[in-house]
Image: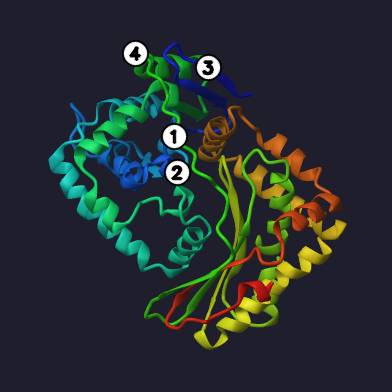
Amino acid sequence: MWRLIELENGVTLLVQPMPHMRSVSVGIWAASGSAGEPAPLAGVSHFLEHMLFKGTETRPALEIASAMERVGGVLNAFTAKEYTCYYAKSLDEHFPQAVELLADMYHNSLLTAEEFDREKNVIIEEIHMYEDSPDDTVVDLLSSAMWPDHPYGRPIAGSVQSVQALTCQQMRDYYRSRYVPAATVVAVAGNIETPRAEEIIRRYFAAAPPAAKVAPACPDTRLAGACAVYTHKDIEQTHVCLGFPGVALEDGDYYPLRVLINALGGGASSRLFQEVREKRGLSYSAYAFADSYKHGGNIVAYASTRPANARQLIEVMAEQFAIVAQHGLGEEEIRRSVTQMKGNLLLSMESTGNVMNRLARTQLNLGRVVTAEETAAKLAAVNEADIQRVCGRLLQPGSMFVALVGPEDCPVDVKKLF
């Protein structure tokens, strides 16, 4: 059973013992991501994530890079829209080393101007590398069309222009204001008892002085008017994304939407995959997902094809959404979707890393831990009326967005398409 412990300075500790495992995963989560960045600082959260690996008062960058590898463990980090995570996974016997290393990075990184200037070039190259992946860039293009004036619509890494304009002092100021105990969650899952985990975490995190948590501004999250956008790339295929409004994390339709989107594009048996690939042969891959954040969300469907087939692909994908908008899902399809999702979810909980992630993400996003069993029960409660309500609410005529990346544009009238 997991346990939540609040340290006196505001750090939240979450521990899930898993005595049947040999590993322990620990993550240090800052309630700070790209969605909380002012526009002039776009990309600063991701930049800071890189910088915490560049040396502390007692460790050069090479020592940070090799510390976990020497004991067969993993050290890494990622930045998301609403949080940043630094994590390690190791054998249970190396848990104290993992915590000490992460704490050193989190509290004592030097953030030098020299490393900042060098890493700026690395991040710009990372952005260019990302832009060479059209299946990723078309999703960002869709988000920017749906949220043109909101951080939800910006790439997490920022743009080349915003990264070039960022200064080391701006990053340091951002770090000091956002990486405070009240905005820090430490999550631990694996072969360790709760008292032992608490003892070690307190050793490295309890001494940090308390500080007020910054509440990022929340701009209006209403979506823009439906539209089609295109970016030219000299590549072989046209990459297509269709988008619709989604829901926020605490919305009452969160779970019905998950069941609906899984049935539409959650695997090889989904409607999109079967229609686009198996029946029409239009694309190697076709899928859909729903992103939800604290203040909004969206639905995304993706596939790619030869430019000559782009219009047909868009029409076929739109048709699948139109069919469910009109008819919903039958009880058998709902049960099949729910069973698939429950199986994937509960099997994923056999990983200490996934358990650690769930503890922290739900605590940060919702202010409480939501267990896999609670999620499975809410999914199982979804019925035909729920699906029909979600379809009527979100899949409305004129609500569809289209994004294209490829060698040729394929102009479409989104208001007539769906």
Q: Residues within 10 Å of mark 3 (few under 14, many from 20)?
A: some
Q: Are marks 1 and 3 in contact (CB under 8 Å)?
A: no
Secondary structure of the residue carrying tag 2 is helix
Q: Nearer the viewer, mark 2 or mark 4?
A: 2
Inter-mark Cα distance, 3 to 4: 15 Å
**Residue 126 seen anywhere in this rendered image of the structure:** yes
112 vs 239, left or right, is left
Q: Residues within 10 Å of mark 2 (few under 14, many from 20)?
A: many
Image coords of residue 58 (percent x, y): 18, 27
Going from N to C along the chain, the mark reached first, 2 or 3, is: 3
Name the image quarter holding the N terminus.
Answer: top right
Q: Are marks 1 and 2 in contact (CB under 8 Å)?
A: yes
Going from N to C along the chain, the mark reached first, 2 or 4, is: 2
Q: Are marks 2 and 4 in contact (CB under 8 Å)?
A: no
Residue underneath mark 4: 207
Identified by mark 3, the residue type is: Ile
Going from N to C along the chain, the mark reached first, 1 or 3, is: 3
**Residue 291 seen anywhere in this rendered image of the structure:** no
Q: Are marks 2 and 3 in contact (CB under 8 Å)?
A: no
- Identified at 29% across, 38% down, the residue is 70
Identified by mark 1, the residue type is: Pro
Residue extending farthest to the top is 8
Mark sitting on residue 5 = 3
Residue underneath mark 2: 35
Secondary structure of the residue carrying tag 3 is strand
Q: Nearer the viewer, mark 2 or mark 3?
A: 2
Mark sitting on residue 216 = 1
Image coords of residue 395 (percent x, y): 71, 61
